[in-house]
Amino acid sequence: KKMASKVSGWLRSFTRLKTVSDDTVLKSELQRCLSTFDLITLGIGGTLGAGVYVVTGQVARNIAGPAVIFSFVIAAITSALAALCYAEFSSRVPRAGSAYTYCYVTVGELPAFVIGWNLILEYLIGTASIARSWSGYLDSIIGGVYINALKSRFPSMTGGFFAYPDFLAFFITLIAVTIIAIGVQKSSSTNIIFTTINLSVIIFIVVFGLFYVNVDNWLQPNGGFFPYGGGGVLAGAATCFYSFVGFDIIATTGEEADNPKKSIPAAIIISLAICCVAYIAISIVMTLMVPYYMLNENAAISVMFEQVGVPFVKYIVSVGAISGLSASLMGCIFPLPRIIYAMANDGLIFQFLARIHPKTKTPLLAVYLFGIIAALLAMLFSIEHLVEMMSIGTLLAYMLVSCCVLILRYRPDDQQRQSESPMIDNLQDFSTDSGLSTSNKTAEEQRKLHQPENSEEQSNSTQLSHINRLRRCVSSYTHLLTSQQNSSVPTAQTSRAVTTATALIIVFSFCLFAVLIHGYQQLRNGNGWLIILAIIFTVVLIFAILAVAFQPQSHVVIPFKAPLLPFMPILSIMANIYLMLMLQPVTWVRFVIWLAIGFSIYFFYGISHSHAQQDTGYEQLPQSAQDLVSATSDQQNTNE
């Protein structure tokens, strides 16, 4: 009994939710000073960096050819699915922490910790990799003098993660950390300068490059526009997807935006649209100026102008590249202390990390501590071995935010929940009369009632029990599809149905895509068992999606709603699961190791120091859409 009670207590801790009250939703120790324009430039700066100057050339040359344009379109659509979910949630819960906070409010404490912990890893490795790319690009401008000198003095350790110590990457990271630590206004102003230079150079590249385009480069005899076929376009889209990672930085500014309910959704959508146009424009000009197979993998834009006889342009491109990488570097560092602050402020990690400096209004200790860790990673480690680790954290966050939007949109509002009590009573009475509940009987009476008299009766009872369970499963699913007939607004019952169906969508999407990706060759060879499994997983997925689609949605009016529910969040969930399963197995091993470190902190510290443990308000029923909207609206009106 003691063990069962302890396990039950742990399970309650894993699923307890963070509530957002009228008094706290817009209160913050951080400084609210970021306008919509600041947030847009922050999103563009965090997204439009190495993707323009490096990824476009690599994908065009080795993966998709001129069809890289369609790869970016597909990647943009996939990113937009997650971006729209972020936009809706940011209008509901304008708090620091991004996906971590959204998950804590909707799903529970343990999933929120997993997301927050992996976002920390994402931004750490992202910062380190961009810093190393920054030094590498600068070295390419000066002819490789810097890296050659380092390699001669510090021979790399072959076969491991360590490489030559990149001191420039270390110091450039510390400079960026210092700018972030000074305060949000200073770091935002610096980011605006870098982003403006970067966008100006991109516009120059596109306009100037139009004078050197040659349509024949799309009509080459060896493959034409689609030299790698449709498979190359899809493979290129998977790579290009990571070029759009960065808009979630905007969502971490929930406690620093002037009007987060309106400015954050607008900034997410506008910044993603601008980045999409920039990537497509660069891809068109690049593949029209030079045949795709002649593009330089590491510095395609700089070299292509040399190839058409205007080498001086490479210096202008270099200025844009350095500015873009600098903005991306700051964009990776900027959200890191915000995630740490949110988790420490909730008590899930060490609470001293949530201390705000009275002058800078930033979590100074968190900024410098994790900034130094990122600088050391940039200096000592070969980022090629670790860079995929940032992908899995991002995709997991995107997937769970989509789940949160789906669950919350089908959650009952205040008025409906108040009217549910008599309905619940009637359901309980019905279940009691039908023999499905024995709550009105004592434990002794239940034991006597169900105790079999002999072994034969026990065997018959077991068989009947299995049959009843099967009937109950069929009956439950039938009820999922017909529950909307009884109500046009969400109830606790329909909300639970959506949560269950969403869990099934996640599980069977993993199963289906695992079969399709890792058993593709066997499926082509006609492996019967795999074909049957794929069909079963597909059928279950279809039924689960229908189960969600048949439920009533909340009619609460909020500043921004993601369109095409439930299909848009479900597509986002499935797309992110597919991309996660495309990662290398070693990435999953490293992911599990990082999770093990995080769980040791959570189980030995966070679970007992969580504010949810001390505040009974955390253990209330899940918040409705109306709760969140009314809280933010009331507080916003008070501030105005």
Image: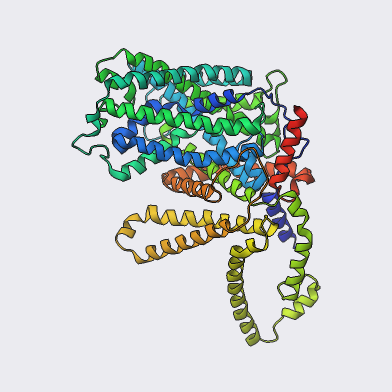
Residue 287 in the image, given as x and y percentages of width and height: 29, 29
Q: Nearer the viewer, residue 156 or 21?
A: 21
Where residue 505 sits in the image (x, y, percent)? 53, 55
Q: List the single residue furthest toward the top.
A: 312
Location of the N terminus by quadrant is bottom right
Residue 457: give x, y in percent of width and height. 65, 86
Number of dots carrying numbers? 0
Q: Nearer the viewer, residue 427 or 575?
A: 427
At x 48% / y 50%, what residue is drawn?
Answer: 574
Residue 46: in sight, yes or no? yes
Q: Residue at x 72, y 75 (%)?
A: 434
279 sits left or right of 458 in the view: left
- Rendered image quadrant of residue 215: top left
Residue at 71% x, 45% y is: 626
Q: In the rendered image of this protein, does residue 396 appear above or below residue 509?
A: above
| Residue 144 found in image quarter | top left
* On screen, residue 443 above or below 257: below
Question: Viewed as shown, does residue 96 lie left or right of 586?
Answer: right
Q: Is 208 left, or right, of 350 in this rendering? A: left
In the rendering, at what x and y percent does residue 555 appear?
Answer: 66, 48
Which residue is at the front of the view, 403 or 206?
206
Q: Quadrant of the C terminus?
A: top right
Display coloring: rainbow
Q: Is residue 350 visible?
A: no
**Residue drawn 56% across and 37% down?**
119
